[in-house]
Amino acid sequence: MKKYVVMTDSGADISLSEERQLDIKVVRLPLIMNQKTVIEEIGINREDFIQAMKSGDTVKTAQPIVGDLLTMWDENLKEAEKILYIPLSCGLSGSYQSAKVLSESYAGRVVVVDAKLVCYPLQYVCVQAKRLLEEGRSVEEVKDIIESQAMMFAALIPSSLEYLKRGGRMSSAAAALGSLLKITPILKVENGSIDVLDKVRTHKKAIDTALTVVSAIAHPQEYQWYIVEADAMDLANEVALRLETLINQPVVVRPIHPIIMAHTGPGTIGIGYTRILK
């Protein structure tokens, strides 16, 4: 029997093929699209989801289906002594709290981690967790390392206020006024939650501002740097080159998947960093 399984959810932006490649189990979260529930990566792929959003589909997200989560835990515990479960940030979803309660009936065999991460940083910390476990750390030790060391900061730039309105991040009145004034908001993801970082008049200014804010950190070599993109690969590659010049560190470009894209929309890019675990 294996000693451990590392598990996360759709908030980590891991595709089905990457799930197999990384050997990280992923609890697939439901999307409610035009009143119909589909499972991310199973009921709809990323490309079709992008087209649906561009066509005006109403999309909402939900926590894991409890039965599906418990089934995954039960099946994996047939092959492993413990599960290290690292879900989407508690500041963005109730998934962590729900999993924490459910894990209490598993007598310590399911260890739930409050990583306060989302998107690529959540995927990255899962990979780091596997490394630490392979080095001989216990599941409980890795949980403590993640909760004491893991962090992320990102500036998110949406392409349209319409998607923020549909995703519930902005009221219809505020979106209409912002569009009239040609305002581009810059959102920040920090301490596991989303807030407004700044509001500027053009998309180009938003990118310039985000690069300035994100790159203004001491010891950049202590972080993993990334650009995340939702149907904006060319722009993401361009911004990655600019960021590499500013910090003199490599930058990873990664896709945003439907669970997060549902709230920010196609065209969104994020610029950020996450701490390398020790």
Image (cartoon, helix red, strand yellow):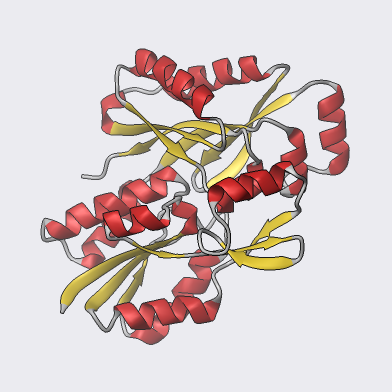
Q: Is residue 260 visible?
A: no
Query: Against 183, is 139 above or below?
Result: below
Q: Which one is in front, 112 or 48?
A: 48
Query: Against 24, is 274 above or below?
Result: above
How many numbered discs, if any? 0
Q: Which one is in front, 142 or 177?
A: 177
Q: Which one is in front, 99 or 16?
A: 16
Q: Residue at x 33, y 46 (%)?
A: 124
Query: Against 109, is 234 above or below?
Result: above
- Side (left or right) of 86 relative to 271: left
Q: Residue at x 31, y 59 (%)?
A: 20
Q: Residue at x 62, y 33 (%)?
A: 267
Q: Residue at x 57, y 64 (%)?
A: 43
Residue 196: x percent and y percent? 65, 34
Q: Quadrant of residue 157?
A: top right
Point out the image quarter for the N terminus: bottom left
Residue 222: x percent and y percent? 27, 31
- Side (left or right) of 141 relative to 88: left
- Side (left or right) of 102 relative to 171: left
Q: Quadrant of residue 184?
A: top right
Residue 87: x percent and y percent? 44, 61
Q: Quadrant of residue 274?
A: top left
Residue 90: x percent and y percent? 52, 58
Q: Is residue 265 visible?
A: yes
